[in-house]
Image (cartoon, rainbow, N blue to C red):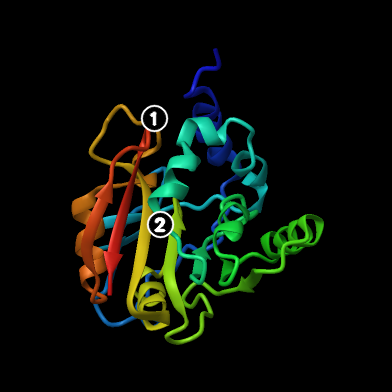
Amino acid sequence: MRNPFRSISLFLLFTTSLCVFAFGQQPASTTDSPKGVYQYRKAAYDGIGKTYLGREISQVMGHLGAAWLERPEREQEERTDLLLDALNLKPTDVVADVGAGTGYFTFLMAPKVPKGKILAVDIENEMINDLNTTKKKKGITNVEPVLGTITDPKLPANGIDMALMIDAYHEFSHPREMMTNIVRALKPGGRVVLVEYRAEDPNVPIKPHHKMSIAQATKEMKTVGLRLKSVYTKLPQQHVMIFQK
């Protein structure tokens, strides 16, 4: 039987050497952000030295980690099948997969929204190229890759039913700006779904800055007008935190 933590352990080693600051390690300046939103300090080994509401923002795995995103054992380790069910997608939903990467989950969701679409957002051209290649190969027409920036996912105002971030939000170098723009893109009653490794559980073998607690996520979402609606707890190592506008 495959050790469920083996590939995670390899990932930790992998990201230590191949981590790129795709969302940008920022200099000690707040000129591009609301005054006082961010603070700066000496970076932890897995952080960038920039803090938001008491949380140091983590380093980022970029396109060099694409193979890990597509590993065959991911479904069993993360139970992506359960996550897909937990989203309760409607056929007409427009979903933004923010930090879509190679589109592993984008293309799982696409058949669930045959009358809607998936906006697959990433800030790296390499990931957008991968998304377009897979879209063409699979013949899927309701996936639209979107090249965003570190502050703006480039989503249409009042245009999405749900924004999904799978192990991505904790890496945003500008979480306040990104979430402000995501909230603007939500339709009335729209949902934000954060999937994050559980910081409350010391047995989850992920570097500390790549985990988030429910309390911390709730505090950060509150600043942009989102309230915690529910938490799905049946995944092996991750929270599924559902917030509503």
Residue 140, compared with residue 188, is above or below; it is above
Q: Which amino acid type is shown beneath numbered disc 1? A: Pro
Q: Are marks 2 and 1 in contact (CB under 8 Å)?
A: no
Residue corresponding to mark 2? 88
Circle 2: element type: loop
Instruction: For label 2, count other residues whose C-alpha is less than 10 Å away and answer few (under 14), some (14-19) or many (20+).
Output: few
Residue 106, compared with residue 162, is above or below; it is above
* Number of on-image labels: 2
Image point (46%, 64%), residue name: 90
Image point (27%, 56%), residue name: 55
On residue 205, the disc is: 1
Judge by depth and name the residue closer to the eye, 244 or 222. Answer: 244
Instruction: For label 1, count other residues whose C-alpha is less than 10 Å away and answer few (under 14), some (14-19) or many (20+).
Output: some
Q: Position of residue 100 (x, y in %)?
A: 57, 59
Q: Which tag is nearer the camera, tag 2 or tag 1?
A: 2
Separation of residues labelled 2 and 1 (CA atoms): 29 Å
On residue 14, the disc is: none
Name the image quarter holding the N terminus.
top right
Q: Residue furthest bottom?
A: 157
Left or right for 121, reference 32: right
Left or right for 58, reference 141: left
Q: Which amino acid type is shown beneath numbered disc 2? A: Asn
Circle 1: element type: loop
Image point (51%, 66%), residue name: 91
